[in-house]
Image: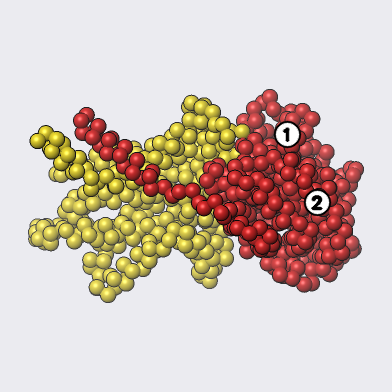
Chain colours: A yellow, B red
Amino acid sequence: MQLDHRARQLVRYLPVLPAVLLLLVFLAGPVVWAFQASLTNAGLTGRSARNPEWVGLENYQRLLADPAFPLSLGLTVLFVGGSAVIGQNLLGLAIALLMRRARPAVSSLAGTAVVAAWVLPEIVAAFAAYAYFSKDGTLNQLLGSLGLGRPEWLYAFPMVAVMLANTWRGTAFSMLVYRAALNDVPAEISEAAQMDGARGWQRLLFITLPMIRGSIATNLMLITLQTLAVFTLVWVMTAGGPANASATLPVLAYTEAFKFGDIGYGTAVASVLILIGAVFGAVYIRLLKEPRP
Amino acid sequence: MHRALKTLSLFASAVVVLSACSPGTPDEGTKTLKVAYQKTDSFTALDTMFQAAKQEFEAANQGVTVELQPIEGNDDDYGTKLALALRSPSTAPDVFYEDTFKVRSDVDAGYLLKLDPLLEGWADWEKYDDAAKAAGKADDGGTYAVPLGTDTRAIWYNKKVLAAAGVSDPWQPRSWQDILDTARKIKTNDPSVIPFNMYAGKGTGEGTVMQGFYELLYGTGSSLYDEESKKWVVGSAGFRDSLAFLRTLYDEGLAVTPAEALDANVWKKVFGEWFPNGKLGATVEGSYAPSFWQEGGSYAWPAYEQEMGVAPFPTQNGEAPGAVSMSGGWTLAVGAETKDPDLAFKFLTTAMNEKNSLAFTVESSQIAVRSDVADDPGYQGANPFVKDVSELVSVTRYRPATSDYPRISAAVQEATEAVITGSRTPEQAAADYDAAVTDIVGADKTVRK
């Protein structure tokens, strides 16, 4: 009987086994590999490609002394804060709120336009954004025809350009999350507040937002992690330039590992990125777990 | 604890089952050779060559399949992709296209097969010139790669633009000052023309240093690397002077705007737009320039033979030998992990036989490295500039091909970028470069000169 019980327990794991295996092989595997490689001097070519040596924390010490690192870290925070937490998040919420008031035709038209940027493959979206912001691009033609000058966006304001591009591309996700969340807010509560004399913004601030708090935290976590990892968009638009002025951490990691062939150092940057992502993830999960008021 | 053990045992059994499913060894009767090389929309000469070689080779060797793996990307991306493929024996190609300046570090990494025993049996090897052979040698004296061709760099100028500014033809500047004087003349005559462009900044990558900064630096008598002591040169006056020259060009608007210079695609405008439209006076470019303009090239421009001129890049104040040039070039190599070295080498010799070498050399406007190709009238008459650019081989220099080089090159590019954008003075940028080099190779591997 005992054996039978055990066997049944084992069988219970069977359905999740493929998923767990896939996660281990394709998620945990590379993370562990990257961390292990960051403790060596592994290179793309040269002597250290054949026989990487264990160098302990040397790559991390170098990273702390590298002037490119604090700059890159700052740019990453700016990029995530500006284009995800503020840009995508607030714009997505605003569009979702406005769509509830708009006529169905207008609302679905606006929804399609926003989602169009999101369904494009990243590389296509990146080229579209490059074409839009480049010297002779759409934006400058518009500005030029209005007599507002033609600034070289990708050269003079690279971070502004990539942040606007990322906001454009990612807003649809936040909009969809908030539309679903807003549909779950019971109309009676809002109406009751209206009866009590609450103005529009008061209803938003004191009724709607607290009620969709869970969705806000989930959305913030997802877009933060997504934006932290954005590489293609920045690489295609500016390649981290000029003079590292838009080199976020993923771009820095790529440059070090593949352009300079220093895989050990590049994976150290990547490991730091994973760590930052993990910290953000942990903070948001805590927010989610706190009891609702 | 119990539960964890059970889960583990499940994983273990799954691993056993999964590994049993791996594909078996392929049929012994057929052999496959993997060939990796670069192909872009403006560089298809190599693809043509390998397509021809594949047909020839498969016809002569029954049961052998040649699998061509063209990699589409610029030089940097091709190098990265190739290095990643070489890291694992299961993805490593048997024969591949290899940049000369990566030969040494790839030999150090154990990616390349030593070819000496195989070359002994190849009659054509005698026809290669010695300087070119040296490009395939590693520190141990062995040969690891067979050169496909080489190149030189010179000033390419538009005769119409220069004539309009009253510059006599042929133009031959004797010093940096001559270049500036002519450029200023062109600018005064027609401010809408870019008088004299030199690549700078990280956007153009190796182009910045090979077609720009090194022509300046090596013309000052200084150099990047001291071959005798095997140390990197820091604190040289030549380095500062070279940066100062670039600053003058960019500050006075004699070159493109800094924003244009930092665009990785600026060279396409040089070849495709500015020269053919008479919007550019002169620039420093490779001997392969005609490959873009000749029939079938990506920016076909039949009039280039009459409208363009070529001149050696002068030394700083006309010091002997009066001219300076840089050379690179590409090779074919055999993967160290290849299962059948003889077969792979045989394919390499088919790809590089006289007929294929000649066709490739002419189509990509390379400088011949084989005597039979160099003597062929088809090569000598390929374009009016073959003789001029081939003569520069006598003054040409090569990059130091060590594994630190890519980082050093990036530091040089950064210095040029800082100067043309005005964020640093030449002195500051040179000091930054010195600090960067010392950081990369260590103080004991640098020398003040």
Q: Amino acid at mark 2?
A: Asp
Quadrant position of the N terminus of chain B in the picture: top left
**Image location of residue B291, percent across then percent down:** 74, 63
Q: Is residue B54 visible?
A: no
Question: Disc 1 designates what residue?
Answer: B139
**Image location of residue A233, percent across then percent down:** 47, 55
Q: Relative to B236, say whether B444 is above or below.
A: above
Q: Is A245 placed left or right of B235 in the picture? A: left
Residue positioned 34% across, 51% down in the render: A223
Quadrant of the image occupied by residue B110: top right
Query: Where residue B124 is drawn, which disc sits there?
Result: 2
Mark earlier in primary sequence (2, 1)? 2
Q: Amino acid at mark 1?
A: Asp
- What chain does badge 1 belong to? B
Quadrant of the image occupied by residue A164: bottom left
Of B293 and A200, the residue lying toward us: B293
Residue positioned 76% across, 35% down in the render: B141
Residue positioned 20% across, 59% down in the render: A182
Q: Residue furthest top?
A: B444
Residue positioned 71% across, 45% down in the render: B145
- What chain does badge 2 belong to? B
* Mark 2, other Cα within 10 Å: few <14 / some 14–19 / many ≥20: some
